[in-house]
Image (spheres, grey):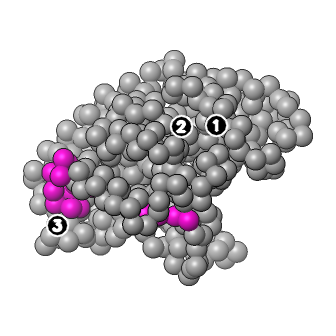
Amino acid sequence: MTANRPGNLSPLLKQATDVYAERGEGCYLFDTEGRRYIDFTSGIGVTSTGHCHPKVVAAAQEQVGKLIHGQYTTIMHKPIQDLSARLAEKMPGDIDTIFYASAGTEAAEGAMRLMRQATGRPNIVVFHGGFHGRTMGSASMTTSGTAYTAGLQPIMGGVVVAPFPNAFRYGWSEEQATEFCLRELDYIFDTISSPKDTAGFLIEPIQGEGGFVPANTKFMQGLRERADHHGMVLGVDEVQAGYGRTGKFWSHTHFDVQPDIVMTAKGLASGFPLSGFAASRSLMEKGWPGSQGGTYGGNAVACAAALATLDVIEEEGLVENAGEQGAHLKERLESLKAQHECIVDVRGKGFMIGCEIHKDGQPDGDRADRIVKACEASNLLLLRCGPRKQVIRWLPPLIATRQQIDEALDIFAKALDATA
């Protein structure tokens, strides 16, 4: 059913589909006429346990009847304490303290603030193609597309953009791209931002909005080595790629690297607004008193939903499922790539896979849009990303089965034929 867009909703909000959803269940959305859609957008990677998982719903309902808003710099409540303990167990190394907010962009702002305060240095190095949010500080660190900073200039200073090892875009091998990027990073230290002025790095281990581009072990470990050598902080933005989506709980663990800061949001609470970043107590204590806070961060209902989300992920083996079924998804997409010249690259890990669509050697966002619209007409919802919206992204809920993956891929294959 075509969405009936209310006239009072901002006209600047552009919807990716025409679906007017009435309810969700598992991997499916249902519109007001009862039509069922396979939702492989997952609310941009948010509904990790599917729509309205019974255990998440029950936990939220129970908490609503006890305490809805317990502002966490005014009072303390059990859901936030329990969640913090559970999350600390999931964090790498000695990371054991967490700051909560409501959206990923707030987590990015908080991480940046801590990096600067902890080191006493002004500059943050980010990487070309990264997305960290839409508010001023996080948008200033975002280079996945110009839409996030157009009309906003001048943006925040103190941000230096370094190349990301996107081997496909460069047309090089992964090794060549990695060596180039690390060499250019060292050149940045020589010519743009002295290490004495550089607080550290903030990176998506697998880029999201920039086109679902994974980093690699040599590059990530190269960042760790430089951070250690120069006394910098390494922060990883796990907002989209983390929380089991890539077949490991955190995407950076694919690359055997130990960060100092981990950002999280999206799949954290199965749809309830909750985000945060974590660091070791020794690092967190280097931030300035009063520099962290917020009205809605660590909301009691969202924390209860996040605890239930962790239970579901662990009890149902969803990280393993994302790895296993994601490998099948990627294998079948590779097979379709061999049959359709418009697909020039298939990349990603687990349930975070991108298909790059080109025509005559150039990104073809128009064709990608037609493919996605043809899928929608056949009851499959997908999204696009990349600087020219030329990448079709696959973000199934972590509960997706082999049968659901295959059904979606069959629809996708027909859409490729129909839009040729």
Image location (x, y in percent) of residue 390: 30, 65
Q: How many marks?
A: 3
Q: Which mark is residue 260?
A: 2
- Magenta stretch, residue numbers: 158-176
Q: CA separation, marks 3 and 1?
A: 54 Å
The residue lying toward the viewer, choosing from 177 and 348, is 177
Q: Which image quadrant: the C terminus? A: bottom left
Q: Which structural element holds mark 1?
A: helix
Marks 2 and 1: in contact by CB < 8 Å?
Answer: yes
Q: Residues within 10 Å of mark 2 (few under 14, many from 20)?
A: many
The residue lying toward the viewer, choosing from 370 and 314, is 314
Q: Amino acid at mark 1?
A: Leu
Image location (x, y in percent) of residue 57: 66, 32
The residue lying toward the viewer, choosing from 362 and 50, is 362
Q: Is residue 235 above or below residue 341?
A: above
Q: CA separation, marks 1 and 2?
A: 8 Å
Image location (x, y in percent) of residue 230: 47, 45
Q: Residue at x 24, y 69 (%)?
A: 363
Q: Nearer the viewer, mark 3 or mark 1?
A: 1
Q: Which mark is residue 420?
A: 3
Q: Residue at x 57, y 69 (%)?
A: 157
Q: Which mark is residue 283?
A: 1
The residue lying toward the viewer, choosing from 163 and 150, is 163
Q: Amino acid at mark 3?
A: Ala
Q: Amino acid at mark 2?
A: Asp
Q: Earlier in the sequence, mark 3 or mark 2?
A: 2
Q: Which structural element holds mark 2?
A: loop
Q: Is residue 241 visible to the viewer in this orientation of the structure? A: no
Q: Is residue 286 visible to the viewer in this orientation of the structure? A: yes
Q: Which structural element holds mark 3?
A: loop
Q: Is residue 389 above or below residue 396?
A: below
Q: Which mark is residue 46?
A: none
